[in-house]
């Protein structure tokens, strides 16, 4: 599976966030809170939902630790921050160069991330960049369904040799 490489501008998001670890994964709690309220975001640019992860000093699979704390957002892209619903917050996604993987399969299957970090990234001309990782969950996303589709966005930069 080869990704497409995209350079995107910063994006304005509105949503909710929680701190969690891989061992204490609170993704279900976050999305259970966000999804019923997403319709209160009146200036969204699409129906796509962003699942954003903010890691500190994460350099790939070798850095994986079950107790590593990170922040996760459930959000939607908006045209501006003029109308932020109660209980939600604004966030500006940094933008930059991303490797974008079109993934079909269950969101519970982590083999795609093993492929990205252990196979594709080391064999590519890129290395992981210290920016947001995110998934875009569009109309074809169906949580834990083997026919589900999403885009996985991995922040990259050219390897310096």
Image: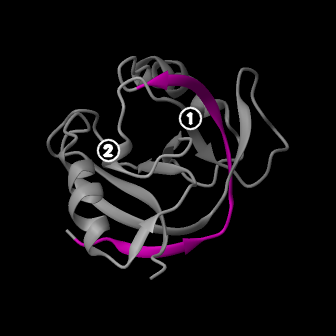
Up/down of 102 relative to 6, above or below: above
- Name of the residue lying farthest toward the front: 161
Residue 124 found in image quarter: bottom left
Residue at image position (45%, 29%) is 68
Residue at image position (71%, 47%) is 43
Most foreground residue, 37 or 153: 153
Residue 130 found in image quarter: bottom right
Query: How many numbered badges does the structure rendering display?
Result: 2
- Side of 73 relative to 87 (left or right): left
Label 2: how many Cα within 10 Å (few below 14, some 14–19, many 20+): many
Instruction: List x then y, in percent, for residue 32.
Output: 46, 19
Which residue carries the number 2 mark? 141
Q: Secondary structure at mark 2?
A: loop
Where does the magenta region start and end?
2-21
Most foreground residue, 27 or 70: 70
Residue at image position (41%, 23%) is 67
Residue at image position (58%, 39%) is 75
Q: Which mark is residue 44?
A: none
Instruction: List x then y, in percent, for residue 56.
Output: 56, 41
Q: Main secondary structure of the magenta part?
A: strand
Examine the structure image and report whether residue 128 is included in the region drawn in magenta.
no
Quadrant into which the C terminus falls: bottom left
Circles 1 and 2: CB atoms closer than 8 Å = no
Disc 1 versus disc 2: distance between alpha carbons?
A: 17 Å
Which residue carries the number 1 mark? 73
């Amino acid at each position: 599976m080869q990704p497409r490489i995209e350079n995107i501008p910063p994006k304005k998001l509105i949503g909710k966030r929680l701190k969690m670890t891989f061992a204490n994964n609170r993704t279900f709690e976050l999305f259970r809170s966000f999804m019923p309220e997403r319709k209160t975001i009146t200036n969204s640019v699409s129906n796509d939902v962003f699942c954003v992860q903010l890691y500190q000093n994460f350099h790939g699979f070798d850095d994986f630790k079950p107790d590593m704390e990170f922040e996760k957002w459930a959000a939607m892209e908006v045209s501006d921050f003029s109308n932020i619903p109660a209980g939600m917050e604004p966030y500006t996604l940094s933008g930059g160069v991303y490797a974008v993987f079109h993934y079909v399969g269950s969101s519970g299957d982590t083999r795609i991330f093993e492929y990205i970090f252990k196979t594709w990234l080391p064999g590519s001309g890129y290395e992981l960049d210290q920016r947001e990782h995110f998934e875009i969950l569009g109309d074809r996303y169906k949580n834990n369904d083997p026919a589900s589709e999403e885009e996985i966005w991995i922040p990259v930069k050219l390897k310096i040799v």
